[in-house]
Amino acid sequence: MTVAVNTPYTVPIVFMQILQVTVLILIAAGATAIVLTRRHVHQVLLLSAYGMLLAVLFLVYQAPDVALSALTVGAVALPIILLLTLAKTRKREE
Amino acid sequence: MEYFPFIVVAWILAVGLYGIVTSRHLVHQIICLIVVQSSTYVLLLGVGYVTGAVAPYYYDITVHTPAVDPVVQALTLTDVVVEAAVTALLCSFAIQAHKRFGTLDPQALVSLKG
Amino acid sequence: MTPSQRRWIFLIAAAGLLAFFVWGLLDLPGFGRYPGPYGFIINRIALRQTLATGTVSAVNFDYRGFDTLGEEFILFTAAIGVSTVLRRLRGEREQQSAADEAADRDVPPTSSAVRMAALLFTGPLVVLGWWLTSHAQANPSGGFQGGVVLASALIMVYLAGEFLVFKRFSPVDVTDAVEAVGAGGFAAIGVAAVGMGLAFLTNYLSKGQYAGAVSSSGTIALISFFVGLEVAAAFILIVIELLEQTLLIRGGE
């Protein structure tokens, strides 16, 4: 396969490709798990782990900026907003 | 290997859409919408990738080192943060719907009442 | 229409949609074979033109500054929307009764481990958020990431203490004002360029001497500061509104 000439890598490029394929398979499995889970608090925790997996994928795609913002948003901001919504709607069901 | 990342994008999109259509709770629908949006980020960054290249930050490397495309990274970066705020707006709609109708089942909230 | 009918119709339609989608994706030039000249051109000239070693931030705030302005106003509108939708309706009242503030109410206490960890992390998170916001032109950082980290530092205050302490740290009026300053500041920088006779959002400040220093790259550092303020204030506002709904407002109806 054609690659960019004079790459600055010090390990063979196939290592990076194996890493990318592994993380992509994990992401596909994570997305399926999120959709098929039934309990809502478990879904929010799975979403947090999915956000961290996305950050690893963005880092492997050589995009550290996007990895940083995906990590902070997906692991901190989104679960808080969703958990507060769940708490508010569950409280009134008593 | 050439098209495997794009097949994964199509799979994530399909799974997320399935979750939205056959959902029984508004918060579950919002989470599936987040999954669908994340598939677009993976697609955008996959389009701009160059095999054997590094990140486009020239603090200690020369300008002639092969680097990936920075324009799609800029687009994805702002997208990720704005998605969280739009999700918060959707959650506030869900809270108000629950207050008014007492249920969060989208298939029971079908008809609009005055 | 029963749910199983809906599911079958969706599966048939999704099969058609996916067929077209994958057919379009297979026409792309393969993963890793980026052909287009735009990315390579920007990589080559961004350092020379803006003296910013962080090319992504240079693209975000200089070459594509107009798109970033639009996205920032989406964020602004979403935060205002949350404030408006979760306003106090007729029949509800904010209830801080004596039972809520009694010293011996049986609320499950926050565990000491959570309080210690939250207290330890609050200070470093503020420093980290500020460093990220002010170094947009040098490192993989910028206003958006720094703003979210700053907001999470204040959320640590809520985790370490109580909601009323958190509310005293960031009252809603001050947060509103800071968010407006952030959004308006970005637009004002662009309008100031027009006032000087240049195009909207031109990089008109001095570029500095050293590439990647904090005081280099003109308006990129200034815009990143305003964006960081606005993103932090927007997220704090959203969390305050949701917490008020959950904890304080008891319903009427």
Image (spheres, helix red, strand yellow):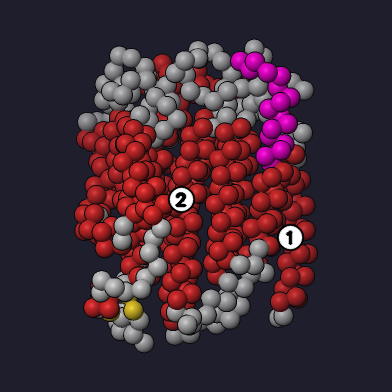
Q: Quadrant of residue C50?
A: top left
Given the image, on which type of amino acid does mark 1 rest?
Ala
B97 w.r.t. C116: above or below: below
Q: Quadrant of residue A26?
A: top right
Q: Which residue is mark 1?
A: C14
Q: Which residue is mark 2?
A: A76
Would residue C7 appear left or right of B91 to someone viewing this image?
Answer: right
> Residue B95 magenta-drawn?
no
Would residue C226 appear left or right of A78 to someone viewing this image?
Answer: left
Majority secondary structure of the magenta segment? helix
Q: Residue B21: x percent and y percent? A: 65, 67
> Which-is-in-front pick, marks 2 and 1?
2
Asked if both marks, 2 and 1, belong to the same chain, the answer given is: no
Q: Residue at x 33, y 47 (%)?
A: C119
Q: CA distance from mark 2 to mark 1?
A: 33 Å
Q: Residue A4: x percent and y percent? A: 67, 18
Q: Residue C44: x percent and y percent? A: 50, 18
Under circle 1, the secondary element is helix
Residue A19 appears in view: yes
C216 w.r.t. C200: above or below: above
Please provide the residue range marked out in magenta: A7-24
- Around disc 1, counting alpha carbons within 10 Å, would you say few (fewer than 14), some (14 to 19), or many (20 or more)? some
Q: Residue C128: x percent and y percent? A: 36, 36
Q: Chain of mark 1?
A: C
